[in-house]
Image: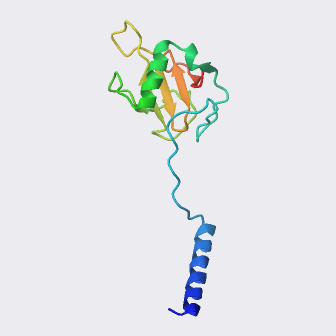
Amino acid sequence: MTDRTRRAAGALLALLVTLLTGFGVAAPAQAAPTVATSVAAQPDCGDTSSYTVVKLSALPAEATDTYNLIQQGGPYPYDQDGTVFSNREGLLPACASGYYHEYTVVTPGSDTRGTRRIVTGSGGEYFYTGDHYESFQLIDVNS
């Protein structure tokens, strides 16, 4: 290959890279970590600023147990834990199907799953309900 051919091939390659970059073709982004870093996490699909923020440490101790299980990826006490939460009540920001997942917060002495849950969002947010989806609080997981 002559110098002239190499230069032409290099120029053609540079032009191709410039064109592809200009049209938004880029290397795939790395997946974001699933560990929550802040209560300020905003879902990709809505605003959480209207929710009462509660410190994780202020919730029943079992909520911290559930949060820790979520961080570890289980094992969970109930088969339903980790399943998609559909937000039928419409109390959480409207997001695409599959955005939210629910986890049981064990109620000591209860023979059932009880009414307490943590619902997670793909944007890193954590919500608590102690009344089986009648109301939600945004959890500050850093407290």
Q: Identify the coloring.
A: rainbow
- Identify the image quadrant of residue 26: bottom right
Residue drawn where x is 37% and y is 28% of the image: 74
Q: Position of residue 67 (x, y in %)?
A: 47, 24
Residue occupying image coordinates x 54% and y 33% = 36
Q: Nearer the viewer, residue 143 or 6?
A: 6
In the visual, does 2 lie left or right of 83? Answer: right
Q: Is residue 103 above or below residue 20?
A: above
Which corner quadrant of the image does residue 49 belong to? Answer: top right
Asked whether residue 132 is in view, the answer is: no
- How far from the left and from the top, in percent, is residue 38? 61, 31
The x, y position of residue 126, in whole percent, is 54, 28
Position of 114 with respect to 130 (left or right) is left
In which quadrant of the rendered view does residue 75 lie?
Answer: top left
Q: Which residue in the rendered view is the most extreme toward the top?
A: 109
Q: Is residue 4 visible?
A: yes
Q: Quadrant of the C terminus?
A: top right
User: Residue sitting at 62 percent across and 29 percent down?
Assistant: 39
Task: Report the front residue among 9 and 117.
Answer: 9
